[in-house]
Image (cartoon, grey):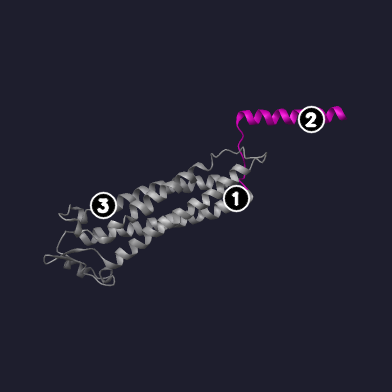
């Protein structure tokens, strides 16, 4: 597959992942699927917007850049047809790095939130009842959270999704960084010509053939 085509596939994959991460982060503002009366009752890591900013907004820019690489103009510069494509592939490495940073930010926040557990109501006191992720392997302690109802599975499911999706995003951006490096060094496997460029190229070839026959 051409480097531009590979980048387009990666970009198309990143776009829905970014949307799902943002959605998961938004749902975390409603612990257990309910609206809390005070914002202090929401888990602290939710307010760092890992899914909205890290794996959402910061991921949209790389995704759009990757998606447009295949259709990038091949005219190049200074008579070099691959110059424009090579520069575009080089710039994609920078955007891939931005994507890795955004996904890494979300990944770390999700891991911390899963380890710490949710903030819930313990006899009228909103606190973090779990320590060192003990609730992950012991479902019996889930009952310590009196409210909101079903808070622990809600917290565990959404932050686990953020962890997995941000990890996938980081891998895809890393792949594009390597793909961009390869495209920068070697260029794209082909460069589609516009109808005008095709006509000019054919005219040029015909002129060379005519000149060669005249010399003979």
Q: CA distance from mark 3 to mark 1?
A: 41 Å
Label 3 vs 2, first from the N-terminus = 3
| Segment colored magenta | 187-216
Q: Is residue 36 visible?
A: yes
Q: CA distance from mark 1 to mark 2?
A: 34 Å
**In the rendering, at what x and y percent does residue 38 appear?**
16, 56
1 and 2 marks in contact (CB < 8 Å):
no
Q: Are there few (<14), some (14-19), or many (20+) residues within 10 Å of tag 3?
A: some
Which corner quadrant of the image does residue 168 belong to? bottom left
Q: Is residue 45 above or below residue 200?
A: below
Q: Nearer the viewer, residue 119 or 152?
A: 119
Secondary element at tag 1:
helix
Q: Does the magenta run of residues contain 158?
A: no
Residue 81 is left or right of residue 106, and the answer is right
Residue 131 is left or right of residue 81, and the answer is left
Q: Give the labeled residue for mark 3.
A: 27
Q: Is residue 191 above or below residue 99?
A: above
**Residue placed furthest toward the right:** 216
Q: Is residue 20 above or below residue 143?
A: above
Label of residue 184 in the image: 1
**In the rendering, at what x and y percent does residue 63 appear?**
45, 47
Q: Give the labeled residue for mark 2.
A: 209
Q: Does the magenta run of residues contain 199?
A: yes
Label 3 vs 1, first from the N-terminus = 3
Secondary element at tag 2:
helix
Secondary element at tag 3:
helix
Which corner quadrant of the image does residue 75 belong to? top right
Q: Residue at x 69, y 31 (%)?
A: 201
């Amino acid at each position: 597959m051409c480097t531009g085509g590979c980048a387009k596939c990666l970009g198309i994959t990143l776009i829905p992942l970014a949307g799902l991460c943002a959605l998961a982060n938004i749902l975390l503002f409603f612990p257990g699927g309910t609206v809390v009366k005070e914002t202090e009752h929401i888990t602290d890591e939710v307010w760092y917007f890992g899914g909205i900013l890290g794996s959402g907004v910061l991921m949209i820019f790389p995704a759009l850049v990757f998606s447009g690489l295949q259709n990038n103009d091949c005219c190049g510069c200074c008579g070099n047809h691959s110059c424009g494509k090579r520069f575009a592939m080089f710039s994609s490495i920078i955007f891939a790095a931005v994507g890795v940073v955004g996904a890494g930010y979300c990944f770390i926040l999700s891991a911390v939130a899963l380890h710490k557990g949710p903030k819930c109501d313990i006899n009228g006191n909103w606190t973090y009842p779990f320590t060192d992720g003990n609730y992950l392997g012991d479902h019996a302690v889930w009952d310590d959270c009196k409210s909101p109802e079903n808070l622990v599975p809600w917290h565990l499911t959404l932050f686990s999704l953020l962890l997995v999706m941000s990890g996938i995003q980081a891998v895809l951006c890393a792949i594009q960084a390597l793909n961009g490096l390869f495209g920068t060094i070697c260029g794209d496997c082909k460069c589609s010509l516009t109808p005008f460029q095709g006509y000019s190229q054919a005219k040029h070839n015909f002129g060379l053939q005519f000149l060669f026959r005249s010399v003979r």
